[in-house]
Image (cartoon, helix red, strand yellow):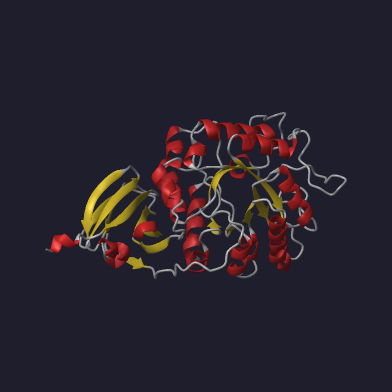
Amino acid sequence: MSVSNIVLIGLVSLLVPDSALDNGLAITPTMGWLHWERFMCNTDCDADPQNCIREELFMEMADVMVKEGWKDAGYEFVCIDDCWPSHERDAQGRLQADPKRFPSGIKKLADYVHAKGLKLGIYADVGTRTCAGYPGTLGYYDIDAKTFADWGVDLLKFDGCFMPDWHQLGEGYMNMSRALNQTGRSIVYSCEWPLYEWQHQQPDYEAIRKTCNHWRNYGDVYDQWTSVKSILDWTADHQKILVPMAGPGGWNDPDMLIIGNFGLSHDQQQTQMALWAIMAAPLLMSNDLRNICPKAKGLLQNKQIIAINQDPLGKQGHRTLKGDSFEVWERPLSGNRLAVAVMNRQEIGGPRRFIISVVTLPSWQLCDPKCNVTQILPVYQEMGVQNLFSEVMVQVNPTGTTLLTVSPIKSNPHDTL
């Protein structure tokens, strides 16, 4: 590629704020499974018992997560999204599960999931109704938090539909955060506060980080490449705001992994997995783990990619180069290492060559005097010892991504003797 056609993007400040939600949770990005994108609000269990939102769906996913290596790979949450409750609260004002689709109740489902060594997530809404029209939590923050704690819930996804006055969004999310903490139970708090506030003004991310463990910024992911691209573009366009806010205990959430569904090619699935790892995103799959192809399963369980996502340094990566239909994203890792994703945005033709050097990758300075380069995607390959003046060529498929790690090699003082 021609260097004249690329734009190096100014480095984003990677300082992590001093203050985060102090509940000791989500020290690394949350990993698990969430029903929404794949199963949505399918409540017709008579016509479609295999795919409707009922207790058996979550029990079966928990079974598969243990039997098929998902738990061992790090995926620990089984999360219920919208459409689980009854349309009416009980006589005490508490939420209750739909009696036909969840006859055993959420407490029994939580017990089942916990017995598998997994954790249960649930869904509610800050406003008067959920997005699908079920009872909302406005005016019931303490009651609902206590109910979830009593049931043994481990994560709450808290949506932002039907808030009568958007100015009350922040107050509502903070009230629920306080209520959850007062229960004494460890409950990961997944917010959608900024997603709904961006429609009116730039959100206060300092306040959001003090309130939530992760937070959605942008619209829902769909099972299509244009959706994944739009999320990446929006994130890159706002990275100077977003990246400094991420760190242990609080993460930007670009929405669910749709790997293993219908809309993405394998190259595009690799791109989503690689970039979600670079962005230090929660890895919440929305797919059918009971029926997933081996290639998608292998990608989602790839230990090297998961290690990048879960890196203990806790720094979110960002886009550092854009041009000639290529993008380069980088993420600093522990041990002074670096993860690099080279994405080919072209949607025509065949694989294209990209040269990684100190010109296209200023962070290549860590290869002075030497570094070791490992390609993780599209296939694992040791690319050997490199130096500051090396040029490493990678081939990137259309809409695909090459993912690398770069590890500095300390000089041996005896080498100069």
Question: What is the quadrant of residue 415 in the picture?
Answer: bottom left
Looking at the image, residue 169 lies above or below residue 291: below
Q: Could you tell me which quadrant the C terminus lies in? A: bottom left
Q: Could you tell me which quadrant the N terminus lies in? A: bottom left
Looking at the image, residue 342 lies above or below residue 241: above
Q: Nearer the viewer, residue 373 or 336?
A: 336
Q: Position of residue 85 (x, y in %)?
A: 75, 43
Q: Residue at x 65, y 68 (%)?
A: 200
Question: What is the quadrant of residue 119 in the picture?
Answer: top right
Q: Residue at x 84, y 49 (%)?
A: 93
Q: Residue furthest left?
A: 417
Q: Position of residue 396 (x, y in %)?
A: 32, 49
Task: Residue 289: tell me if it is visible.
Answer: no
Side of 276 where 373 appears, left or right? left
Q: Position of residue 381 (x, y in %)?
A: 28, 44
Q: Nearer the viewer, residue 353 or 119?
A: 119
Q: Position of residue 319 (x, y in %)?
A: 41, 62
Looking at the image, residue 260 lies above or below residue 352: above
Q: Residue furthest right?
A: 91
